[in-house]
Image (cartoon, grey):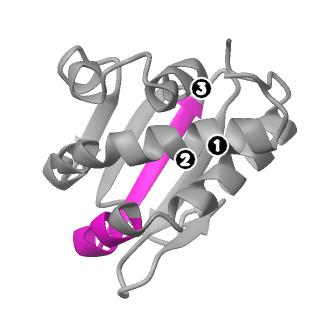
């Protein structure tokens, strides 16, 4: 299954809702809070940008930058989809530069240990949306 949306507005709404759901997974929330920084995520095809702000002991997702990014990730929507389906390995994607990075990414790379929980959350989310995984 390919990334489910080509329309930028639908893709943005889909992804932002998913990121909010990820924040309800305790180990993912804790990982983001422990980073204590702004993470910019920049997706292509379609182009979608969002920021996770975990500076104040809480997590907020923004559609516009809340300040300077401490780290950023650049990847395609298709790769994002494959990562969260478990069809691509996140560590390999970093090493192979399929995910381009900038800033303090060492903490983000450590969050790859939460991928099994994130994959399950994504599959559940797709199911809730009536999208086959």
Q: Residue at x 61, y 65 (%)?
A: 62
Q: Which mark is residue 77?
A: 3
Q: Alpha carbon of mark 3 to alpha carbon of mark 1: how far?
A: 18 Å
Find numbered disc 1 in the image and state the secondary structure of the residue it sits on: helix
- Does residue 76 show up magenta in the picture? no
Q: Alpha carbon of mark 2 to alpha carbon of mark 3: how far?
A: 17 Å
- Find the magenta span and give its range: 29-43
Q: Which residue is mark 1?
A: 124
Find numbered disc 3 in the image and state the secondary structure of the residue it sits on: helix
Find numbered disc 2 in the image and state the secondary structure of the residue it sits on: helix
The answer to whether marks 2 and 1 mark residues whose Cβ atoms lie closer than 8 Å is: yes
Q: Quadrant of residue 17?
A: bottom right
Q: Quadrant of residue 100?
A: top left
**CA neighbours of label 3 inside 10 A, class few (<14), some (14 to 19), many (20+):** many
> Mark 2, mark 3: which one is toward the viewer?
2
Q: Is residue 92 left or right of 84 when viewed as pictured?
A: left
Q: Nearer the viewer, residue 133 or 36?
A: 133
**CA neighbours of label 1 inside 10 A, class few (<14), some (14 to 19), many (20+):** some
Residue 16 horizontal/vertical position (percent): 67, 53
Residue 46 horizontal/vertical position (percent): 70, 26
Q: Residue at x 20, y 43 (%)?
A: 109
Q: Residue at x 29, y 21 (%)?
A: 93
Q: Earlier in the sequence, mark 3 or mark 1?
A: 3
- Tally the marks: 3
Q: Which residue is mark 2?
A: 121
Q: Is residue 123 above or below residue 64?
A: above
Residue 33 horizontal/vertical position (percent): 32, 74
Q: Is residue 121 left or right of 96 when viewed as pictured?
A: right
């Amino acid at each position: 299954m390919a990334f489910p949306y080509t329309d930028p507005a639908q893709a943005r709404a889909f992804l932002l809702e998913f990121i909010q759901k990820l924040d309800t997974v305790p180990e993912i929330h804790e990982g983001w809070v422990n980073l204590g920084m702004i993470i910019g995520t920049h997706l292509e095809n379609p182009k979608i940008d969002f920021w996770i702000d975990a500076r104040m002991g809480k997590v907020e997702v923004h559609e516009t930058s809340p300040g300077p990014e401490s780290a950023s990730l650049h990847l395609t929507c298709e790769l994002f989809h494959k990562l969260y389906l478990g069809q691509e390995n996140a560590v390999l994607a970093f090493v192979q530069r399929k995910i381009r990075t900038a800033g303090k990414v060492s903490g983000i790379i450590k969050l790859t240990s939460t991928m099994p929980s994130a994959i399950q959350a994504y599959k559940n989310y797709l199911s809730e949306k009536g999208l086959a995984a």
